[in-house]
Each structure stands twice: as C-alpha cells, then as structure tokens.
Amino acid sequence: MAHIPDVPKSGDSSRTQLALQALTQAINTSSPASAYAKRAVILLAMGRYADALADINEAIERNDNAGSYFLTRAKVLRALQQPAKALENAQRAEILGVNTPELYTLQGDLLQQQNQFDKARLYVARALQMAPYDGEAYFFNGLMAAKQGDTAQALALYDQSLRLKPRYLETYNQLSAIYRTLGNLNAALAYNERAVRYFPNNAKLIYGRGLIYHTSGRLDSAMICYQQTIKLQPTYYQAFFQSGLINQKYRNYYGALANYQRVQQLRPQFPRIDTYIGFCYEQTGQYDLAIAAYTKASQQNAGDRQAAAGLWRSQRRQYAQQNPYNSVILPDASDPLPSAVNRPTLDTTRVRITTIQPKTRVLTTESDSLRRTVKPIN
C-alpha cells in the first residue's frame, strides 16, 4: 500500500510537489478514494479546477458517504462558478455530518450568490458562533450588505474582515471597487496597492488597478494594466474589452476591433459585443461586415437602438459606395433614426417664405452612437 501524505499547508511549494507525486503514486498503485480526495484539495489550491473536479468525482465514486468529499466538491464547483450545484454538494456534506465553520461560511456564500440573503445570514451567523474571528465570514456579511445597498455597513464589515484576515484577496477587490464607484480613487488605489504586496502577480488585482486609472482618465496607464492582465491571464476577456474601449476612444478602430473580436472568441454571449464590432467595421469602411454584425446584434436584442442606427447608416453608406453617381443624400452619421411618422408639410400658400443662406455645417464621418459606451467602466 503506497503512502498517502497529508495535504501540505498553503504556500509550501516544495512540499506540495512532493505530496502530489506521492498521491499520484498511490493512485497508480491502488487508487484509494482518500488519495483522489487529497489530490483534489491540492489541485483546487493550485487553481487547476477541472483536474480537481475529476479527482473529487473519482473519490466520491469510490466512497459516497464521506461528507468531507462533498465539501471539497462544493468548493471546486464554486470555483467553477456553478453555485447551484455547489450548494447541493454543501448540503449533502452537512447531511453527512460535516459541522465546521468552513462549511457554513461556504453555504452562506453560495446562498448569497443566489440572492437568498436571509438564509445566507443564518449560515454565516452559525459560522461566527463557532469561529468569532473568521475574517471570511465578515467578508460575506459585507458582500451581502453591499448587494443590498448598505455601503457604509459593507465598508465596516470589509475593514473588520481585513483586520482578521489580511491576506484575503477578495476583500481588497471589493473595497477598491466600492471606493472607485464612490469616486474616491485615492482610497481605491491604496487598497489595490496593499493587495498587490501580498499578490504581486494576481491578474484580477492588476485589472482592478486598470479600472481605477481608466475611471480617472489616465488611459495610457490603464492600457498598460490591461496588457499586464492579459499577459498574466490570456483568457481575461474583460481586459480585452476595456482595451477595446480605450482604442475606440483614441479612434484606433482596427485595434479596438481586434480587442472586441477576442472578447467574442472568449465570451460569445458578452452583452452587445456584436454592436461594438459592427461600429468598428463601420468606422473602417467595411460596411458589408458592419451590416452583418449590426443585423446579428439587432436579432439578439430588438431594443438595441445603437445597433439599429448603425445598421441604417451602414446600409446607406454601402449603397453610396457602390453607386457613387446616384444622387443619394447621405445622412449625417450623428443624425437620429428617421421617424416612421409622416410629418406635416408647410402650406406655402399661406406663409411667405424668405430664402436665406444656410449656415455652414461641418460634416463628420464618425458616429457618436457608440461614443457613450466608452465612458462607463463596469
């Protein structure tokens, strides 16, 4: 029987690798459930969520009466952003006799993710009864307060969480996000910098710093942060989107298009991404592609007025491009959609008309229909 080591403490990379090797050897030798379960815990801590899920599923297949295995699977599923399935496993762990602050805090988090705040508070309160100095429990209480609009209470709870658990990453992210939303960018940046000292290569923190710079109008600094985020985590689609907004702001439509297309590859259901792509095609004169993108956006969301306006402009510009000698009067790109209502004409028999010279009007080829989308930073 191969030796099955205990799970090493977090941060001890050398012992972690030795433990992984020993557990893999045990699995190859006799495939015990405990070896799969312990390896799943290590893989979860390493961020290898798919591998962790495969291992914990094997462990449960071999022993479906171990509550700790269901707790581990609940944590893995939470990391994979499957809160409903995670909650089912957490409840199963409780039925099988797991009675720990970790389980109750986890259940509180999973319930608040589904906006079941009353039940969530009961579980977090139970966790605090068992472990009054659990910084993570204070964090989830703060998260619930923030979701329900009590910003002052959320800030107080987050501060308490940091005092008890100064290395809890999400607390810094939430504090930074709240202060950025409130317009206190100095405080937002200060919390971000404190977190970076503990987690210097964390993509989410670098992205958060980019948002702070973006909000303050320091677009070049924001772009550097987004590029660093992508380097650390090439699938971070939000960083590609924000980079697209900055390129769009600078009228670098080819650069923005590349960013938006990457977002679409990584997250096909990203809200209104076809509208952004269509706008870039329109601004670069690729009207056939713009029409296709705007049409898709309009089909997905009939209320997308910017997509409808872009489609209307692109169709007319394409027609003018293909028929340069046709006397078609193109609308100004900033004009609104034509009204379907017939406007009454002027009765010239009753009103004397004096001809005047029209004022000089500078035409612009750039639409402002998507200019508003550059400003918000979510």
Image (cartoon, helix red, strand yellow):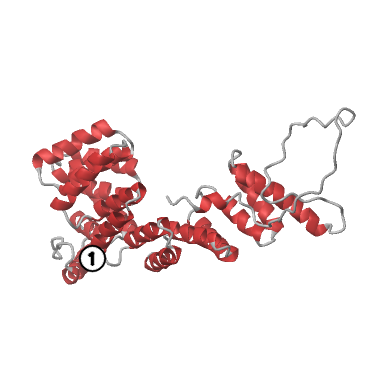
Out of 199 and 52, give the one closest to the viewer.
199
Q: Quadrant of residue 216?
A: bottom left
- The relative height of residue 295 versus residue 281 in the rendered view (above or below) is above
Badge 1 element: helix
In the rendered image, residue 219, in percent from the top left (x then y), is placed at 45, 63
Residue 3 is left or right of residue 173, and the answer is left
In the rendered image, residue 70, in percent from the top left (x then y), is placed at 23, 45
Q: Quadrant of residue 337?
A: top right
User: Which residue is depicted at the point 59% across and 63% down?
Assistant: 253
Amino acid at the residue labelled 1: Arg
Residue 198 is left or right of residue 269, and the answer is left
User: Which residue is depicted at the point 79% across and 30% down?
Assistant: 344
Q: Quadrant of residue 193?
A: bottom left
Out of 163 and 102, give the one closest to the viewer.
163
Residue that label 1 marks: 197
Question: Image quadrant for the N terminus?
Answer: bottom left
- The relative height of residue 289 versus residue 64 in the rendered view (above or below) is below
In the rendered image, residue 218, in percent from the top left (x then y), is placed at 42, 62
